């Protein structure tokens, strides 16, 4: 089951399969049927509370699918339900196995991304191009996709549709390994390789990750010194290069006080402008969940911020997302784990994909770990 969920993640999060005519939505349904068949025949240890919770979620979405007259909305939470049931059926050994697969996979992806960035800097061009589902061109540079090319630098995205997604999933596996005590000396090099994405969220997560490692005043200054030396030396040696110039430009303060690399302020502002009593029950439009491109054409871009779930889904469907954020900052035990929980919450505030393919897998995994038998198994 751990292998099946890992394979599903690797396949459904790649824009390549959508491009060749195997949509992630169809693949998700197929994987769902296969995984439920495995559980039905071979797994008996699935908690009733997770099955009940899944039935409640599915029933609510069916109700809103009927309300909006949008059949696709009924299938919206399938990946979340599947992930929740699979992780609840696994022992802690199975969870560790899944985390091991994910870590090795993300290590390869980010390592290939670094090689691809070097390949581009040396003059290498795209080997082939595909279209993302949002219409953006995604070029393959040696061993990594990238849809961001400013002429002298790419932001590699590995096997994902954009660099921010690579950074998100890399941060998530490192955070989970840290929370479950599986982190080791290889985690920090992998974390620093993630800076190749030039993601501001990656910088914030990295700082908080270092804070989570602090056990006393001595270790605080040790890790703070290491973080300062690595970041400052990188900026110094790269200051006269195209990489350094681009990185500095993303952290430049505009005349209006905004950060130049900030792509969320405008989205939040547009989302705020749509808040009124009429959208609180069922959201502004089901298309904002089932066909985001249509939503953008009609209402403008307002996704990828912590307000968008409320706008898109209304109070009832978005409540689990906001409860999840609260759980992340309150339930983890220990100062280090609480910092990691907060860093995960910040990642999901930037990418509030509670039910989305790939992302909701992390939601289910964390919920099972924080509430289920795996936390007890880990302590023992």
Image (cartoon, rainbow, N blue to C red):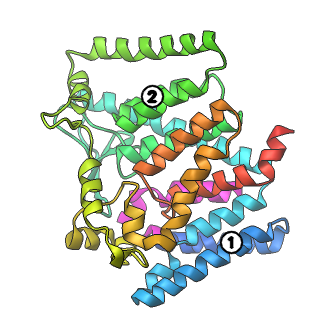
162 in magenta: no
**Residue in view at x 31 percent, y 59 percent:** 132
Q: Is the magenta stretch mostly helix, strand or loop?
A: helix
Mark 1–mark 2 Cα distance, whole angstroms, equals 38 Å
Res. 287 in view: no
Hey, which quadrant is residue 231 in on the image?
top left
Q: Where is residue 234 in the image (x, y as percent from the top left)?
A: 35, 16
Q: Where is residue 107 in the image (x, y as percent from the top left)?
A: 53, 35
**Residue in view at x 56 percent, y 64 percent:** 320
| Number of dots carrying numbers | 2
Residue identified by numbered label 2:
193
Hey, which quadrant is residue 237 in on the image?
top left
User: Who is closer to the viewer here, 118 or 274?
Assistant: 274
Hey, which quadrant is residue 125 in on the image?
top left
Q: Position of residue 148 (x, y in %)?
A: 25, 43
**For mark 2, does the 10 Å Cα neighbourhood hold few (<14), some (14 to 19), or many (20 or more) residues?**
some
Q: Position of residue 150 (x, y in %)?
A: 18, 38
User: Who is closer to the viewer here, 165 or 104?
Assistant: 165
Q: In which quarter of the image is the N terminus?
A: bottom right
Q: What stretch is highlighted in magenta?
A: 1-24
Residue identified by numbered label 1:
53
**For mark 1, does the 10 Å Cα neighbourhood hold few (<14), some (14 to 19), or many (20 or more) residues?**
some
Secondary structure of residue under mark 1: helix
Q: Residue furthest left?
A: 255
Secondary structure of residue under mark 2: helix
Mark 1 or 2, nearer chain start: 1
């Amino acid at each position: 089951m751990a292998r099946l969920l890992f394979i599903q993640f690797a396949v459904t999060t790649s824009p390549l399969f959508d491009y060749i005519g195997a949509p992630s939505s169809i693949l998700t349904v197929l994987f769902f049927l296969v995984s439920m068949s495995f559980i039905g025949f071979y797994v008996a240890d699935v908690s009733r509370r997770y099955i009940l919770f899944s039935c409640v979620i599915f029933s609510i979405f069916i109700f809103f699918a009927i309300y909006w007259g949008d059949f696709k909305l009924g299938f919206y939470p399938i990946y979340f339900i599947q992930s929740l049931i699979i992780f609840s059926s696994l022992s802690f050994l199975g969870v560790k196995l899944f985390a091991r697969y994910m870590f090795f996979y993300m290590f390869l992806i980010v390592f290939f991304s670094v090689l691809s960035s070097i390949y581009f800097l040396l003059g290498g061009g795209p080997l082939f191009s595909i279209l993302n589902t949002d219409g953006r061109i995604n070029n393959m540079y040696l061993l990594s996709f990238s849809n961001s090319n400013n002429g002298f630098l790419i932001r590699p995205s590995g096997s994902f549709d954009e660099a921010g997604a690579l950074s998100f999933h890399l941060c998530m596996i490192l955070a989970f390994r840290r929370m479950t005590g599986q982190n080791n000396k290889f985690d920090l090099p992998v974390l620093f390789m993630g800076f190749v994405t030039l993601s501001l969220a990656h910088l914030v997560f990295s700082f908080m990750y270092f804070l989570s490692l602090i056990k006393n005043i001595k270790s605080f200054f040790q890790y703070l010194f290491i973080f300062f030396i690595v970041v400052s030396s990188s900026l110094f040696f790269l200051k006269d290069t195209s990489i350094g110039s681009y990185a500095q430009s993303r952290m430049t303060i505009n005349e209006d006080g905004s950060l130049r690399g900030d792509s969320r302020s405008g989205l939040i502002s547009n989302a705020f402008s749509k808040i009124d009593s009429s959208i609180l029950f069922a959201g502004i439009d089901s298309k904002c969940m089932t066909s985001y491109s249509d939503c953008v054409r009609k209402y403008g871009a307002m996704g990828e911020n912590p307000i968008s779930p409320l706008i898109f889904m209304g109070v009832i469907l978005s409540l689990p997302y906001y409860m999840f954020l609260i759980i992340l900052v309150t339930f983890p035990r220990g100062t280090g784990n609480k910092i990691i929980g907060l860093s995960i919450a910040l990642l999901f505030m930037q990418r509030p994909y509670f039910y989305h393919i790939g992302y909701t897998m992390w939601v289910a995994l964390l919920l099972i770990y924080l509430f289920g038998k795996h936390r007890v198994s880990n302590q023992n």
